[in-house]
Image: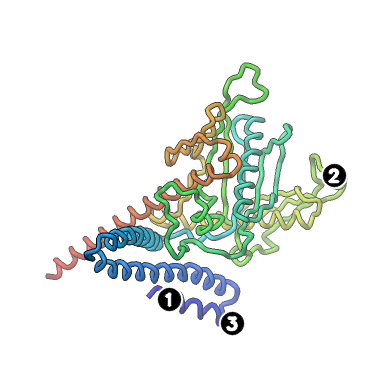
Amino acid sequence: MLAGSAGDVGAEGGGGSGGGGVTARRDVGREYSLLKPLATAYERLLRVRRELEDLAALLKDPDSRVRAMAEEEGRELQQQAAGLTRRLLLALVPRDPRDGRAALLEMRAGAGGQEAALFCGELLEMYRKFAMSRGWSWQVVELTASEVPGGVKHVVAAVADGRGAGRRAGEIGDGGEGYDGGEGNGDQDGDAIGVYGTLLPESGVHRVQRVPVTEAQGRVHTSTVAVVVLPQADEVDVKLRDEDLRIETMRASGAGGQHVNVTDSAVRITHVPTGLVVSCQNERSQHLNRAAALKILRARLYDLEMQKRAKEMDEQRSALVASADRSERIRTYNFPQGRVTDHRTHLTLHDLDSVLVGGEGLQRLMGVLRAAREEEALRRLGEQEEAAAAGAAAEGRKRR
């Protein structure tokens, strides 16, 4: 059934001159990219089960060496079957359709003044290195620096999968080895989910505890940085009408050389129907600043629309979308103790350096959180199935 559905969708997407336009072709492509690996995983699960049935005879072989080899192979096949079954069950959980999108990563220094701005700059570098390690593209589209060198008050970076479409949300490898018991490094799963789906759980308040360089008494200060991850919107998703936009140009302010200050390169765009305002002066060209501002505006309008739709969804769906509360303190970076604590999973790693370079430490934090959320999703799915079965049984008794 899965294989047939994937084949049908693939044929539909390859039909050439369809009448659905860009949106229809994109939707078909995304559906195909989801169904094809599921069909492959299901076929692999059937093969594994057949191999286990074939091993049953060898387990009764009079030769102890044959039985031992059969038992060892059986354990490996059972592990594969468990992983594939888990992934197929996860595919039944409603997913956020935006998971496979590119993302806008926005960070703003919070409490703590210049120390917060310095930490914002460090988080920016951490996520840049994390993106580079995955082959993702990275572009800073808006940045407001602080007075202290290396400090960042506010920044927006566009992050996309530089390797092309790749695997999409819910995609499964042939062997089902993606699950690692909750201790994964997040590498395989992060690629399967997509850029936005991988980075979304980073939304929230990141807290740093350390002794600032300006602190003469050696006291530990606490500062915060707010991180928001938005899905990048395609132009076919958000239609911007010229009559709804008020575009103003002005001379850029701040450092940047004589060209920045003598030309009207800065751009401010106001979306009149919603009142949203986006300003951009990071580029030397007015044309580039306008394009960057429109990209941010589209993403924010898209997020606004999706928030309206999310309010209409039931509690289960809202939980599975994994939309973290932006006012929630999600992680603490303690420099004196060299540790990082994720407050959602209560995982503490004494590997601060690896986290700050976007390495294995950060991947492990993401992987454990993802595994915990998958387990919660499966639990909710099981409860839903039990409730449906109980309802059907009750209805059957009434009819009798």
Q: Quadrant of residue 80?
A: bottom left
Q: CA distance from mark 3 to mark 1?
A: 19 Å
The residue to which callout 1 is attached is: 5
Q: Is residue 325 above or below residue 88?
A: above
> Which x, y percent locates residue 20?
56, 78
- Tell me the SS state at disc 2: helix
Q: CA distance from mark 2 to mark 1?
A: 58 Å
Of residues 39 and 105, the one nearer the viewer is: 39
Q: Residue furthest top?
A: 217
The label shown at residue 259 is none
The residue to which callout 3 is attached is: 16
What is the quadrant of the C terminus in the image? bottom left
Marks 3 and 2, the one that precedes in the sequence: 3
The residue to which callout 2 is attached is: 261
**Which residue is located at x 49 percent, y 39 percent?**
330
Q: Is residue 396 above or below residue 191?
A: below
Marks 2 and 1, the one that precedes in the sequence: 1
Marks 3 and 1, the one that precedes in the sequence: 1
**Which residue is located at x 44 percent, y 38 percent?**
347
Q: Is residue 313 above or below residue 142?
A: below
Of residues 234 and 50, the one nearer the viewer is: 50
> Which x, y percent locates residue 168?
52, 63
Task: Classify 10 Å Cα crowding around label 1: few (below 14), some (14-19), many (20 and above).
Answer: some
Along the horizontal axis of the image, is 130 left or right of 38? Answer: right
Q: CA distance from mark 3 to mark 2?
A: 50 Å
